[in-house]
Image (cartoon, coloured by chain):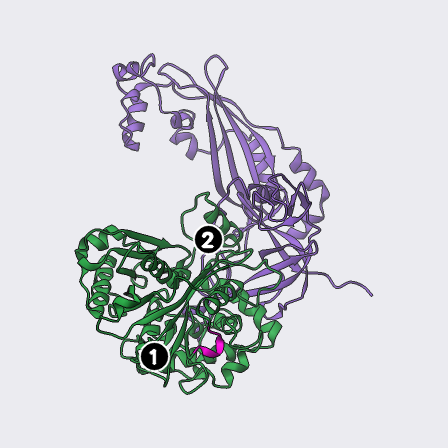
Chain colours: A green, B purple
Amino acid sequence: MTTGTLLPAAAVAGIGATEFSKDSGRSELQLACEAVLAALADAGLKPADVDGLVTFTAETNSEIHVARNTGMGDLTFFSRIGYGGGAGCGTVQQAAMAVATGAAEVVVCYRAFNERSGERYGLGQAARPMDTTADRAAYAWMTPFGLSTPAQWVAMFARRYLHEYGATTDDFGRVAVLDRKHAANNPAAWFHGRPITLQDHRDSRWIAEPLRLLDCCQETDGGQALVVVSAERARDLPHPPALIRAAAQGLGADQHMMTSYYRPTITGIPEMGLVGRQLYRQSGLGPDDVDAAVLYDHFTPLVLPQLEELGFCEPGEAKDFIADGHLELGGRLPLNTHGGQLGEAYLHGMNGIAEGVRLVRGTSVNQPDGVGHVLVTAGTGVPTSGLILGADHR
Amino acid sequence: MTGREDTRQDTGYEERLRAFTGRELRPLTPAQDPVNQPMIRHWTEAMGDTNPVYTDAGAARATGRGGVVAPASMIQAWTMRGYAATVSPPAGRDGFDELVDLLDEGGYTSVVATDSEFTFLRELEPGDHVAVRESVESISAEKRTGLGTGRFVTTLKTYTDQHGETVATQRWRTLRFRPAPAPAPEPVAEPEPVEEPSPPPALRPRPAINRDNAFFFEGAKQHLLLIQRCAACSTLRHPPGPCCPECNSLEWDTVEASGRGHVYSYVVNHHPRHPAFDFPLVVAVVELAEGTRLITNLTGVAPDDVAIGMPVVLDWLDADPDLTLPVFRPAPTEAP
C-alpha cells in the first residue's frame, strides 16, 4: 500500500470551543455555531471562506444548519464518519484529504452536543426503541442480559486484561490520577483545581466491576471545532500550523460495537494497532519520535492497550510504563496534558485533537519542552482513527 | 415439610393438571342482549372512537358494508355477565372453579394476566346474537419468573353467532404463581437508600429480532441453546450472521450446544440499575466447549466467587412469557 503522498499537505490552522459544562442552557446547534465561529476566528478566517464541513454521524447538527446559521456560502465537500467517538481523528483525515485533492480549501471539523443535560450516552441502550437493522439486532446479544452501557462493555475487556497481565485496578487508577492532575491546571477543564489521589480512586464506588466511578469519564455539554487548510495557506495565518503528518482510520477483523469479545484474545485493540501502523508509515516516524500523546480515555482501562498497540511499550507492560512515570509532564511521553476526557471534558475526543494542536503550537497549559510530534487517538472499542500532528520546521 | 414440597412429590398432581388440557371450563353461554346500536354508541363514546361505520348507516354503506357494524374489540363486552351476576355468589361450580382449586392446591394462589390474543373472522351487525365458550388450551410446566414460580394457563374463548358459526376467538393467558417471598424489612438503624434492593417489576429489555437472529431466541423458548453452523464448511459462529466469514456461504443450519463451558470474562454491574435486574448483576462472556463465546448471566454464584476459567453449565431463565434466555451456573464438582 502506498501512503504518504497526501500528507503533510494539510494543517490545522484554527481551534475553537465553547465552555465545557453540565448544562449549557442553549441548543446543540448554538453550541456548534459558537465552536465553529471560535475556530474560524482563531484561524483568522471568516465563515464565507469555508467550503467544506466534516462531522460525526452521531452529530445532530447537520451541515446545512451549521452552514446556514454561520453564514457559510457554497460548500464543495461535506462528509461524516460513523462509530461514535471513533470518528474524531477520522474527521481530520477527511478534511486533510479534501484539502490535498482540491475538493475543498477550508474545511471545518466540528462536534457539539448537550450530552449531559440532554441525551446521556452513559445511561445505556436498555430502553432504546428497537428495530431490526443489523446494528440494532446486535444489541439482542447484550441488553436482555443487562449488559447495556459503555462502562459495562469496557469492563468485560478490563477484567480479562487484569487476568492475563496481572495488572490491578490501581493501574487503571493511575490514569485517572494523571488526567485529573493535568486538568487541575487547566482553567477550561471541568475538574480545574480538583486533583485526585490513588486512594480517592480506590474509595470511589463500583460502576461495573472492575470499573469504579473514577475510571469513567464525565458527561459534558459543549462544542469543539477545528479548521483544516493547506499547509501553505496555514503559514500565512496567525498561528503556527499544526501539520497533519499522518491521519488514519481502522476497523479490525471481527469488529463489534464496544463488544468485540469473540476474537482469539481481547486484551488488545487490533483496530488501534492498524491505525498506528498507518500513522507511522505515512509519517515516516516511529514511537520514539512521538513527544506527547492524547489517547482516548472514555474509560481508563483502554488507555493501557493503546500504549501497547501504538508501540510505546510491549503488550502487558503498560502497567509498568505508567507506574514508572513515563506519562508525566517530565516523562518520556506526556499524556493528556489538557486533562483528558476524565478531567477536561467529554467531547467525543475532539477536544483532544485541539490539545494536540496546542501542544504543537507550544501553548498547552501543561506544555512539556520540545514537542515536535503529537499522536492523538479517537474512541476505543469501536472502529477508530488517529493522527500525528507535527510542528512546521520550514 | 412445607405444602410446596408436598405438591412436588405428588406425581398425581401433574397428571391431574394435565387432564385439564382441552377441557371445557365454561359451557356455551349466550350474551344477555343481541348486538345493538345503543350499546355500540355507549362503547365508542367511552373509547373516544369516532369512526362513523359504527353509528352512521350511510357512512358504513359507503365503505361497502351493508350497514353499521360493531367494533371488533367489543366482542368480549357482548358476553360479559353484568353487575348483578358478578357480585352475587355463584349459583353452581363449573370447570373454571375446579381448575382454580387445583392451582390453589399447588400453591399457585396469585394471578396476573399476561396477554390476550384475538382473531376476528367477521364483523358483527345489530341483531347478531353472540355466545361464548371457554376451554383450556395449555398449562405450562413450572416456570421461574420475576414475580415468583408459576404456570402459564392459556385458555381459548370461542365466540359464535346465532347460527353456530365462529365469529372470533380469544387466546387468554394468565400466570398463576406462588408469590416470591417479600424482601426483608428495611433495617431501621442504618438505612442506606442508595443500596436498597427493590423487587424487579419491569421486564428485561427485549431482544431486537430479525431474520438473522430469530432462530436463537426461538430455540431458547424450547430450552435449546443453538449455535449457527455454516452448511458449506461447518464452521460454528456466534453471534450469528447471514454469511460465513470463512467461506462466504449463505447457507447455514444450527447445532445444539452441549451446554458446557467456562467463564472467559465477566462484569459485576452496579450502576445504572435497570428495574428488570437484581444488583449486583453478574454478566459474563462464556466460552462454550464448542469454541464459540456468548454473553450471558451467571446464576447460583455470588459475585465475589466468580472467577475467569470457572467451569459452568447451561441453565434456562424463563424471564417472562415472551423471553427465555440461556444462563449459566457453576458446574457441579465431578467425583474423583
**Badge 1 amino acid:** Ala
Decide if residue A22 is in sight here. Answer: no
Question: Which residue is located at x 58 percent, y 64 percent?
Answer: A266
Q: Is residue B127 magenta?
A: no
Give the foreground label among 1 and 2: 1
Question: Which residue is located at x 45 percent, y 58 percent?
Answer: B274
Q: What is the x, y in percent for residue B71? A: 36, 24
For the residues marked 1 and 2, what is the alpha-carbon distance in whole angstroms? 42 Å
| Left or right: residue A154 compared with residue B255 | left
Q: Nearer the viewer, residue B144 or A189?
A: A189
Q: Which residues are magenta?
A: A285-290
Pinpoint the chain carrying mark 1. A
Residue A96 sits in which quadrant?
bottom left
Quarter of the picture containing the C terminus of chain B is: bottom right
Question: Which residue is located at x 66 percent, y 33 percent?
Answer: B19
**Badge 2 amino acid:** Pro
Residue A389 sits in which quadrant?
bottom left
Q: What is the x, y in percent for residue B297? A: 58, 58
Q: Which mark is residue A183?
A: 1
Pinpoint the chain carrying mark 2. B
The residue indicated by pointer 2 is B201
Quarter of the picture containing the N terminus of chain B is: bottom right
| B65 shown above or below A5 | above
